[in-house]
Amino acid sequence: MEHVVIIGNGISGVTAARHIRKLSNKKITIISGESEYFFSRTALMYVYMGHMKFEHTKPYEDWFWEKNRINLKKGFIETLDTATKILHFSNGDKLDYDKLIIATGSKPNTFGWKGQDLKGVQGLYSKQDLENLEVHAPNNTICKRAVIIGGGLIGIELAEMLNSRKIPVTFLVRESSFWNGVLPDGESDMINRHIKNHHIDLRLSSNLKEIVSGEQGKVKSVIIEETGEEIACDFVGLTAGVSPNIDFIKLSDIETNKGVLVNRFLETNIPNVYAIGDCAEQREAIGKRKSIEAVWYTGRIMGEVVAQTICSNKMPYNPGHWFNSAKFFDIEYQTYGWVHGSKGKPDYEEHVHWKHDDDTKCITIAFNRNTNEFLGINTFGIRMRHEVFDRWLTEKRDVDYVINHLSEANFDPEFYKHYEQAIQNAYKNQLQIV
């Protein structure tokens, strides 16, 4: 019986296993060094905040795996021999495979900062990170101040988590405005104000110089590059992005760049070896998408696609239109299609921006100024329907159509009616339409 081995039990690896089982009777083994059972990584913050227990983050009951004949093996792989098709574990165990799926996910970026390996310095990605957070920042008595390095989505999550336990937070962001490499200026400015309204000490245009050691190898403070200021702290969160977790794969014959290099069928340069999820890097980027995308839903799609290919229905990976969602404290964020920040915005891209007076709701619609084609939308504080925007992007609707039919995309039409006229007025005023 053909043996399919999957390294990594995140959303990509588990989706692949589930779909291979639906399609076949192949022997399946999932390997993980992080946790015995699959859990929802995005829910880790809610465990720390007391909204749920860790066992609630497991989408499947523990008996699910045995019932579906999916073997689980806990352990770390040290080397991978593609010639013999054998995996070598750090404890001396070996496992052979017929087909291999690499789904090892991401790891937090570090940039060789002095003190980055001290106790109390960590990212927020794994189950172990959550456990260490409970050791070093359980309350504001043990952790009198935390410093977060890096202003992305994980950084804002960590700030909210620490804030929920009344731990003072200093947030070092190297950009001149929060996430302004992604968000247009009006949105980024609004999020700056929202972060400060939650009593977070937001320091823009600030880089970390070094992390200073105190007693017994524990963090004592950080020093800011630009000013030399030293900030005393008991915990440092490193949230300056993530990168593919592929160190042991680099020692094999599998071709890597930043990630494991794959074609549109998620195949590596070695026959019967595939890579999916955060660790996979497309040899040729698909449309405007990045060659590596560390987002939950693309990992799930890749898992479904690679299962089809392994079960003799070869299928190319097609992620569809870009979308994403997140939360900035109390403000929900959604994006569909392409809305560029001021830095990367192409010449043809025009924006219509509307913001509510309460400074917690706004919409930015992007369109092609030459053709009026709708390119994308960002929404803050107003929930929209994914399937509607997905259809409009496929149909290449123009911006007038989108503005006039925006209520159809709203998750709560009654709620939306309060803003409909104001959004349409913003569109007319900014484009000087009579």
Image (cartoon, helix red, strand yellow):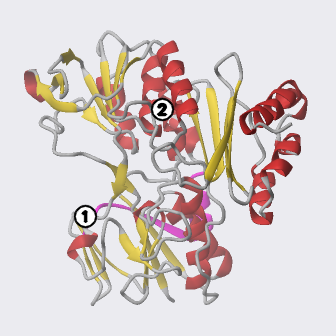
Q: Nearer the viewer, residue 117 or 176?
A: 176
Q: Residues within 10 Å of mark 1 (few under 14, many from 20)?
A: few
Q: Could you give the CA–CA distance between mark 1 and mark 2, rounded to whole angstroms?
A: 27 Å
The amino acid sitting under disc 1 is Asp
Q: Position of residue 157 (x, y in %)?
A: 48, 32
The label on residue 356 is none
The amino acid sitting under disc 2 is Glu
Q: Position of residue 83 (x, y in %)?
A: 27, 90
* Residue lying at 44% horizontally and 53% vertically, measured from the top left: 36
Q: Nearer the viewer, residue 202 or 133?
A: 202
Snapshot quadrant of residue 165: top left
Residue stretch in magenta: 60-78
The label on residue 247 is 1
* Residue lying at 16% horizontally and 29% vertically, measured from the top left: 211
Eyeballing the image, is 15 above or below 110?
below
The label on residue 157 is 2
Eyeballing the image, is 324 above or below 216?
below
- The reply to whether residue 25 is visible in this rendering is no
Queried whether the magenta region covers residue 419, the answer comes back as no
SS at mark 2 in the image: helix
Q: Is residue 239 left or right of residue 62?
A: left
SS at mark 1 in the image: loop
